[in-house]
Amino acid sequence: MSDEHAERFGYPPMERPPRLTTGPVAWLRENLFSGWFNGSLTLVLVVLLGYFGLGALRWATQEANWGVITANMRVILWGRYPQEELWRPVASVVLVLLLAALSWIVWRGAALRRFRNWMVGAWLLSPFLINILLGGLELPTLRTITNNIGYFLFRPDLLPVLEATWRAPTALGIMALLAGATWAVESRRVPRVLALLGGLVFLALNLPAAGLMTEGPAGVPIPQAVIILGAAVGGWLVGGAAGRTAAAFSGARRLLVGLWVVALGVVLLVLTDFEVGRPEYDPQAVLAQVQPSLWSGIMLTLILSTVTILLSFPLGVLLALGRMSRLPVIRVSCVTIIEVVRGVPLITILFMAQVMLPMFLPIDLTIDRVVRAIAGLTIFTAAYLAEVIRGGLQAVPHEQLQAARALGLSEFLVTALILLPQALRLVIPAIMGQFVSIFKDTSLIAIVGLLELLGILSSITKQREFIGTVREVYLFAAAFYFVIAYAMSVASRRVEKQLGVGTR
Amino acid sequence: MADIERIDTGDDIIVCENVKKWFGEFQALRGISLRIRRGEVLVIIGPSGSGKSTFIRTINRLEEHQEGTIIVDGIELSTDVRNIAAIRSEIGMVFQQFNLFPHLTVRQNLTLAPVWVRRWPQAKADSKAMELLERVGIPEQADKYPGQLSGGQQQRVAIARALAMEPRIMLFDEPTSALDPEMIKEVLDVMQELAHTGITMVVVTHEMGFAREVADRISFFDFGNLVEIGPPEQFFGRPQHERTKLFLSQILHQ
């Protein structure tokens, strides 16, 4: 109770706890030199540590050839990604950093609270954007829709290229039109900025084609730059005018949201080529195909682990819920998946994904090796996550569910609003441990022939001028994995601390 | 919800006919027949294991009865999920262990069901929540988490949470049994105030003072049977059944 309480009833005031002998010297005497045995042990250890430490330091500063890392930095980071297309992975990194910075601002500022949904939306959209950026733009067409869905899912690299013709500027025009209209109708800052960003992204996608020439209607060559500029400015002006006219109409905002959705569909159609199957890399294209099998280095390591984490988490939650389902069919199949996958080593699953997955697919449909690796990593992680999450689900007191049901919540809402939030926060450390472990396990991919960080590094050591630099290279790998893994566990502790507020 | 069949039960809001319930081989309810009038405050007392808790849990289907009928506000409790949902949204329940949602603030505890079940706009749910917190006397705790409140405060929040759905019936399952002695009164005061608003209340409790003062009728459960029921003065003054007399002589110091 407070001092106020003590004063009111005349109790003596609260006392300070007694001070112990403290300070660095006292600590040393107590912990390191408490007797002749401990004292000499400390001295011996100091000498040994100094000897090995100095040796390691001398090796690292004088003997080691760190040139193998610095000279190969580009390869280590981006691997075999075409050099002239490097802006695409860089743009992806910038996009993620930008989103992270924006999120930090939005989540910190109480005044920006209402923008959180927009931020979440942006994050949800970003993987698709990045996939398009890195892999090129390709989508199923109306004509070959079923066929193409298969390709889209399993062979995106075979789908057509977005070319620098009329189609790209048309898409740009539509986006500019909507951006202009949104700018005119919306008074809120975030939708305006988002609309503007949407337009700018499409403008940026068109820019690399600006130097090209296009054949106009009467066979007259027109500089692509003119078309692009025309589409952007024209779209913005027309959209703005239409928006100002529509602003008087009360449903304008809602209509605009609908238009954005429709427009995205139209844009995708406009951009889609009605033929399939040109896997070769075409540097003339605006966003040329870069097959995932060319993705390598740290880039591939990060993509593999992020995609695996993003996919395995929901899958793990579903498996865990399925395992506790009352319906026998669902329960038995979930238990089977979980137990089979957990009973098989990861490396076996990875080999099976490379070798056996194609056997279940149509003959002309082959899946990219990277996609196959992701499938293997995802199912493996999901099975382990499912067991971790099941532990959390079972730890939520039954009374919590009863209270939620008594309030009239449906079983779905009870699960989504009461059961899962409580269960997941109980098992954050274990989930994060699983993520850290799969991040490190992506290095096994090297064995099935993909050049992620470890694969690239071991190929580097075979360069003639860097023969015998295995130690430097693997130390670098260890440092890289440690830094990321440690960052993940620090992040996990923070999340835990934040979510732990006021819980029992 | 227009297609839910409603039965006219006149002045009675809860009608139970010969309700039976087994846990495995053990029969917890041995045929309970009971009609509760609109606006009535019914107190249920009885020794532990007498089935009183099980009985009120069958009224909102937290426990399923195997035989007999239960009709709540004209809706029969059947296996039809829509009937169960309709009945649950008309019944508020308060538990012995409060069962507040620890991951949500007090305010969020109160607005969760109105927003997701009743589909109220957040602003409406928020103002209702604040109004209810005023009523139970702890508006200043709205943004704290349940773990930061005392037991008495938590139970008052739990009452407010149940009231946020604007129920016609409130079930109380030993609401003061888990509280420190100093905090029992603050919860009973809220319940007494609530009883005057005309809401139907079914209260399982060991608080004889509350029963005597607030109840319209008191019912005594033993061994899965409804042994005796009557107004407080008759129940305490002239109990009819041998078992009731024995129970009262053991709990009341005279």
Image: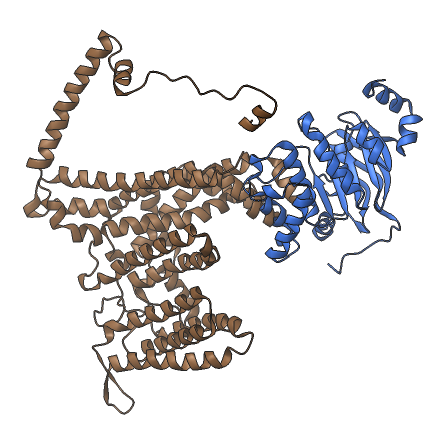
Residue occupying the far top of the picture: A36
In the rendered image, residue B225, in percent from the top left (x then y), is placed at 84, 30
Visible residue check, residue B213: yes
Residue B173 as seen in the image, left or right of residue A309: right
Q: Residue at x 26, y 14 (%)?
A: A29
Which chain corresponds to the colour brown? A
In the rendered image, residue B44, in percent from the top left (x then y), is placed at 81, 33
Residue A353 as seen in the image, left or right of residue A36: right
* Nearest the eye: A19 or A190: A19
Q: Residue at x 60, y 42 (%)?
A: B140
Q: What color does chain B have in the rendering?
A: blue
* Nearest the eye: A282 or A167: A167
In the rendered image, residue A167, in percent from the top left (x then y), is placed at 33, 78
Visible residue check, residue A407: no
In the rendered image, residue A140, in percent from the top left (x then y), is placed at 39, 69
> The N terminus of chain B appears in which quarter of the rendering?
bottom right
Q: Residue at x 71, y 35 (%)?
A: B187
- Compared to residue A33, the image places residue A431 above or below, namely below
* Nearest the eye: A475 or B95: B95
